[in-house]
Structure formats: structure tokens, C-alpha cells
Image (cartoon, rainbow, N blue to C red):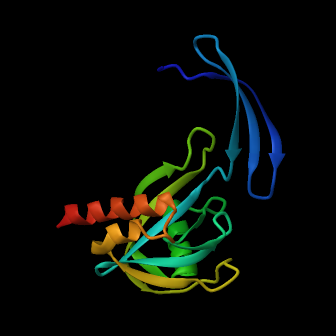
């Protein structure tokens, strides 16, 4: 298992303005040849920002076309060109929540479905917030919701909180904050 399979061919089979679907031909060390498809997004990935203000998270309610409904989630977005991860996080925070952070910490980079997608989401903790806004690309104003960190279990079972990245990031940050005490 320590030897990665060899990629013998890779070609784009479909493409949109956001995604590319690639066919990847692999040969494993035991000689088994397999054809996979993978969804390729931006090579830089995206950021998800866990903004902490006092004893609460700052979240947004945003329409998710994938689930055809409004979701309560952390602000997030793609990393632009050569933008550093922490700058992207602070920009998204200003665009979606109306705050910037004096202290930003990269917590973890994670994938959604590594079996068919390589997209990485960089989870960033934002602290020491101050009012600051930038114009974003959202088609409608986002509702900002303050959620008590101690009520994280209630958050994770809400019908309008289905994004795994939001749930995982909330628990990771809560654990970090508890370790500091």
C-alpha cells in the first residue's frame, strides 16, 4: 500500500466555468489497471472562516443551490490567484460578515471526498474582530447569525446545517478554544 499507483493517462472529459471532470487511468503496483473520474476545481482551493466574537461564532445564512435551500454556515470562498490563504480568509470575512480579524490562524486543510475530488478547504480561525466591509460576489445580502459556541451540539443537528465542513470546523475550533483555557 505504500507505493502510489502510476497515472498512465489523464484527459478532460467535461468542463464548466468552475469544474473539470478528468478521466484518470491508473495502474496499481499489483498490475491492476483501473479508470477513475475525478472532479477538479481550483488548484488553490478555498477558505472557510470560523470567526469568533466573544463566546459566539459568526455565521451566515446563504442559499445553497446544491440543496435548494438556505443553509447556516461559516463564511467561505475561493482563493483568488496568488492570494495567501490568510488574506483570502480575511477578505471573505469582510465580504460576507462585515468584519476583519487582527488574528488569523490556519487550523487545518481538508478535502471533501478524496476518492473523486481533490479540492482543499483551508479552515481558518479568525479572532480579534473589528468592523470592516468589502463588496462580495453574493447575489443577495447574507444574514449574519451569532451562535453560542457552547450550543454547538444544537447547531450540528439543525436541519439547515448540513455542510460537513461547517460542522467539522465548529468542533475543531471549539476544541482549540477549550485547550487554551
Q: Is residue 123 visible?
A: yes
In this view, which residue lies farthest toward the bottom?
131
Query: Which residue shows up at 67% across the image and 78% down it?
Result: 138
Please state the total of marks drawn on the protein image.
0
Pick the residue in front: 58 or 47. 58
As drawn, is 14 to the left or to the right of 94? right
Which x, y percent locates residue 26?
68, 23
Determine which quarter of the picture holds residue 57: bottom left
As drawn, is 93 to the left or to the right of 5? left
As drawn, is 71 to the left or to the right of 100? right
Which x, y percent locates residue 140?
67, 84
Q: Is residue 104 visible?
A: no
Which x, y percent locates residue 54?
29, 81
In the rendered image, the quadrant that contains the C terminus is bottom left
The relative height of residue 146 versus residue 85 in the rendered view (above or below) is below
Query: Which residue shows up at 48% across the image and 58% down it?
Result: 164
Pick the residue in front: 66 or 145. 66
Which x, y percent locates residue 122?
49, 57
In this view, which residue lies farthest toward the top?
31
The relative height of residue 51 versus residue 29 in the rendered view (above or below) is below
Query: Which residue shows up at 63% across the image and 65% down it?
Result: 67
In this view, which residue lies farthest toward the left?
181
Pick the residue in front: 47 or 150. 150
Query: Which residue shows up at 69% across the image and 45% down it?
Result: 39
Determine which quarter of the picture holds residue 7: top right
Amino acid at each position: 500500500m505504500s507505493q502510489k499507483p502510476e497515472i498512465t493517462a489523464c484527459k478532460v472529459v467535461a468542463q464548466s466555468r468552475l469544474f473539470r471532470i478528468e478521466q484518470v487511468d491508473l495502474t496499481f503496483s499489483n498490475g491492476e489497471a483501473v479508470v477513475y473520474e475525478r472532479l477538479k476545481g481550483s488548484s488553490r482551493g478555498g477558505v472557510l472562516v470560523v470567526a469568533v466574537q466573544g463566546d459566539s461564532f459568526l455565521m451566515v445564512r446563504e442559499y445553497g443551490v446544491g440543496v435548494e435551500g438556505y443553509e447556516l454556515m461559516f463564511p467561505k470562498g475561493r482563493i483568488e490567484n496568488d492570494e495567501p490563504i490568510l488574506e483570502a480568509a480575511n477578505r471573505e470575512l469582510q465580504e460576507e460578515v462585515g468584519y476583519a480579524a487582527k488574528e488569523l490562524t490556519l487550523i487545518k486543510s481538508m478535502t471533501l471526498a478524496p476518492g473523486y475530488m481533490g479540492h482543499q478547504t483551508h479552515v481558518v480561525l479568525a479572532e480579534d474582530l473589528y468592523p470592516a466591509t468589502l463588496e462580495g460576489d453574493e447575489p443577495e445580502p447574507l444574514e449574519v447569525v451569532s451562535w453560542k459556541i457552547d450550543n454547538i451540539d444544537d447547531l450540528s443537528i439543525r436541519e439547515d446545517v448540513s455542510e460537513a465542513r461547517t460542522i467539522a470546523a465548529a468542533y475543531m475550533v471549539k476544541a482549540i478554544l477549550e485547550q487554551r483555557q
